């Protein structure tokens, strides 16, 4: 029989909330803790503060099993297992800011009333779990035993629930067999394979995995740039490479670079950490540089047609850093739109999900539209920053019919070239030949 545990999750961001809600499907009693009263209020009303498919449905279905509170001390007191899932944002020098992790560790130490396992789920530099253990030991009562487990998260935004419930592995950096057994009870029912290791290796697995994927993207983007110069087609190249199982066909989509809250931050953090140890991670340094150039590639392409954008009607399709999320962190839209605004363009944008967040940054500088047609009507140029399904599935003839000048600069290769060639449009994409009719 499965053991039901009292599990507390600190932090209700992507990692914390998704971990908590998914663990409720195993029948555990879950308490979600956050310092943000607004978030907790929303969660208590059954609403998720983040847009993530399936999350709200499970929250509602399992509402008897999940409680939400800002009273962290009370929640930690009698927990069997406490997950730390708070943010580790980037500091100015590229290193990870660990103050939220350490503050939670202090509070847990002060509050614990019984033995417990503390699980670090946040992405943290190698050695952080040991520091968390020291903080807990300094703050806890003498008779209480704690063990710290590193258990990094591999979910991606937009598919977070599916990635958690069907993960390819659960990585556990454990200090003892006892801690390993407890963690296996926590996850009993997921049926996912375990990688059991020490804490430093577990911390490293997370960074090494994320940075490898970022490197793969920067690599395919460089090959795409070369394809443009030599007249090759990146999609065929990526397909030909990806069919070799040693390479794999995932993360070979060329585009305007990786964004989001993870790859940009985690590449810089590992590079910083290596420097700290007097070692230069040359591959990761290159991935970061390639990505920075890639993000503004569309504007460079557009300057073939317009020297600057003053007074031009510019249409933008997609604002989020990738589809199925409202997240704008490190989104290419945020690198390009400010330049367009500075140059005096009239910008119309369409992204039904990320619009709300974009409005907070640019409330008046951009006109937000309710359809693709409204966005591209009378436009002198159209930029595609996100490969939402509504863009990929759109009627390409609309560009021809509605735009003043049908120039489409696509940063996500949303359309097949043999389809585009049936229309009277100028189409620039990544790693493929320009279509000029
Ligand atoms: C990433 C990892 O995929 C997760 O495994 C990890 O758990 C997560 O970071 C994290 O550390 O929390 P995420 O940032 O949500 O997840 O999104 P991805 O789907 O990995 O995409 C990241 C960026 O790479 C996006 O901007 C996307 O457009 C770009 N990308 C991805 C490409 O440009 N090409 C590709 O082929 C794939």
Image (cartoon, rainbow, N blue to C red):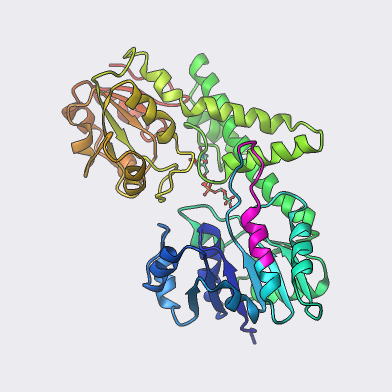
| Vertical comparison of 12 with 140: above or below | above
Quarter that holds the N terminus: bottom right
Point out residue 214 in the picture as x, y percentages from the top left corner: 60, 38
204 displayed left or right of 429:
right
Point out residue 313 in the picture as x, y percentages from the top left corner: 23, 25
Q: Determine if residue 39 is in view.
A: yes
> In terms of depth relative to the viewer, which is nearer, 307 or 215?
307
> In terms of depth relative to the viewer, which is nearer, 133 or 51?
133
Quarter that holds the C terminus: top left
113 displayed left or right of 276:
left
326 displayed left or right of 188:
left
| Vertical comparison of 404 with 136: above or below | above
Residue in the picture at 31% in, 36% down: 317
Q: Is residue 110 magenta?
A: no
| Vertical comparison of 427 with 44: above or below | above
Residue in the picture at 58% in, 78% down: 74
Point out residue 89 in the picture as x, y percentages from the top left corner: 58, 47
Point out residue 165 in the picture as x, y percentages from the top left corner: 54, 66
Q: Residue furthest bottom?
A: 1
Q: Which residues are magenta?
A: 92-106
| Vertical comparison of 406 with 85: above or below | above
Q: Determine if residue 54 is in view.
A: no
Q: Is residue 94 magenta?
A: yes
């Amino acid at each position: 029989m499965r053991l039901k545990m009292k599990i507390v999750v600190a932090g209700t961001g992507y990692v914390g909330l998704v971990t908590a809600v998914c663990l409720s499907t195993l029948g555990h009693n879950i308490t979600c803790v956050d310092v943000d009263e607004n978030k907790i209020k929303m969660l208590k009303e059954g609403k998720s503060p983040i847009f993530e498919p399936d999350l709200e449905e499970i929250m509602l279905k399992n509402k008897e099993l999940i409680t939400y509170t800002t009273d962290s001390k009370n929640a930690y007191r009698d927990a069997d297992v406490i997950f730390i899932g708070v943010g580790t944002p980037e500091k100015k020098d590229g290193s990870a800011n660990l103050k939220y992790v350490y503050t939670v560790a202090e509070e847990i130490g002060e509050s614990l009333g019984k033995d417990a396992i503390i699980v670090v789920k946040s992405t943290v530099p190698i050695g952080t779990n040991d520091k968390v253990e020291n903080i807990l030991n300094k703050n806890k009562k003498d008779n209480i035993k704690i063990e710290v487990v590193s258990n990094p998260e591999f979910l991606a935004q937009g598919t977070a629930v599916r990635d958690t419930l069907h993960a390819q592995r659960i990585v556990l950096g454990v200090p003892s067999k006892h801690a390993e057994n407890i963690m296996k009870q926590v996850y009993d029912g997921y049926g996912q394979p375990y990688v059991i290791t020490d804490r430093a290796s577990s911390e490293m697995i997370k960074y090494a995995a994320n940075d490898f994927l970022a490197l793969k993207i920067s690599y395919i983007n460089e090959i795409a740039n070369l394809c443009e110069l030599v007249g090759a087609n990146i999609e065929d190249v990526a397909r030909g490479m990806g069919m070799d199982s040693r390479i794999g066909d995932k993360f070979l989509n060329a585009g305007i670079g990786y964004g989001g809250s993870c790859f940009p931050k985690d590449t810089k953090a590992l590079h910083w950490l290596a420097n700290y140890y007097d070692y230069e991670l040359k591959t990761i340094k290159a991935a970061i540089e390639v990505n920075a150039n890639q993000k503004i590639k569309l504007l460079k392409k557009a300057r073939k047609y317009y020297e600057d954008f003053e007074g031009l009607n510019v249409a933008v399709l997609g604002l989020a850093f990738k589809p199925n999320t409202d997240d704008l962190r490190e989104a290419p839209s945020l690198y390009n739109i400010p330049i367009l605004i500075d140059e005096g363009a009239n910008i119309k944008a369409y992204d039904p999900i990320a619009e709300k967040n974009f409005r907070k940054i640019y409330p008046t500088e951009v006109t937000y539209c309710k359809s693709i047609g409204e966005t591209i009507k009378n436009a002198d140029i159209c930029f595609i920053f996100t490969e939402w399904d509504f863009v990929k599935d759109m009627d390409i003839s609309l560009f021809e019919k509605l735009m003043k000048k049908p120039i489409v600069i696509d940063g996500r290769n949303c359309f097949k070239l043999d389809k585009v060639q049936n229309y009277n449009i100028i189409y620039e994409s990544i790693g493929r030949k320009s279509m000029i009719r």
